[in-house]
Image: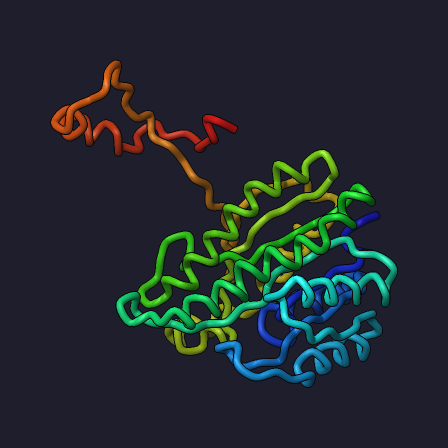
Amino acid sequence: MSGVQGRVVVVTGAGGGLGRAYALLLARSGASVVVNDLGGARDGSGAGHSMADAVVAEIRALGGNAVANYDSVTTARGAAAIVGTAIEEFGALHGVVNNAGILRDAAFHKMADEQWDAVLEVHLAGGYHVTREAWPHFREQGFGRVVMATSTSGLYGNFGQSNYGTAKNALVGLVNTLALEGAKYNIRVNAVAPMAATRMTEDVAPAELLEKLAPEHIAPVVGHLLTEECEDSGTVLVAGGGQVHRVQLFQSKGVTFDDVPTLQQVADRWKDITSMDGAVPGTNPVG
């Protein structure tokens, strides 16, 4: 099967912005799409059906197949309903795009527990719950594709986004392990850090930069990761404004101490320990 033709894909947070762009591209490319969106505000408050319904209407007007789902990704019950919608409406599930997200920014010393918990529940727990519900279907059929939405705020940090950055980088850790566990079942799991002008970023980046960052630039990258032809797994990509590049952890040559070193011996070799000259891709020494 070529591309995503005939595939069934769940896209969470697909009622606008990036999720809408992903859903539209997938549907135009022949996939049946579950358009999931709680329909809330940027901070996760509220709910409604209009956002998901509007995207489904767009897809159907183009002659594509789509169905709306309004469940929250933050619970196992909601995730089961999302995956269940795909199975009930289209008879299968082949891919998941974990795109749903919210923002509750604050400097760390002002971060309230509720702000921390709410963001991790949507991004990290949401990515876990939806993928966990899809995983048995992928294993049984010997095929599955998962795309996690990470962020440069997680990969590199961003002021005022300790909650968001933590959740987004934690998803990379999930990707790394699921890529290993899914390999023999032809399940590929990757991450994309999108840079796009959406309601999530409208006041985060300068207007002149956002003008160059249409969500449509990123949709083909996400779409490719959902295809059978894409064999990559455990890959992290940054995409936006026409640019796509890979991000990978590297490790330095480091230093080997024959005996337990003293504090001074560590200090004396610190430049050798931290120098990235001749660095190579990092690996898990106990994996």
Q: Please state the horizontal and vertical placement of residue 158, each as a whole percent of the image.
A: 35, 62
Q: Please state the horizontal and vertical placement of residue 53, each as a whole percent of the image.
A: 73, 81
Q: Please report the residue visible at 59 percent of the width from the left and 58 percent of the height from the top.
A: 127
Query: Which residue ends up furthest to the top in the rendered image?
Result: 258
Q: Nearer the viewer, residue 216 or 187?
A: 187
User: Quarter-wise, where is residue 107 in the image?
Assistant: bottom left
Task: Answer above or below: position of 27 versus 152.
Answer: below
Q: Please report the residue visible at 61 percent of the width from the left and 43 percent of the height from the top.
A: 178
User: Quarter-wise, where is residue 267 in the image?
Assistant: top left
Q: Is residue 91 visible?
A: yes
Task: Answer above or below: position of 12 versus 199.
Answer: above
User: Quarter-wise, where is residue 80 in the image?
Assistant: bottom right
Task: Answer above or below: position of 210 versus 284.
Answer: below
Q: Please report the residue visible at 15 percent of the width from the left and 24 percent of the height from the top.
A: 262
Q: Is residue 20 visible?
A: no
Q: Please state the horizontal and vertical placement of residue 33, each as a whole percent of the image.
A: 76, 66
Q: Nearer the viewer, residue 115 or 176?
A: 115
Q: Please state the horizontal and vertical placement of residue 124, each as a whole percent of the image.
A: 53, 58
Task: Answer above or below: position of 169 versus 254.
Answer: below
Q: Nearer the viewer, residue 69 or 250?
A: 69
Would residue 12 be found to the left or right of residue 228 on screen? left
Number of residue marks: 0
Would residue 151 be found to the left or right of residue 3 on screen? left
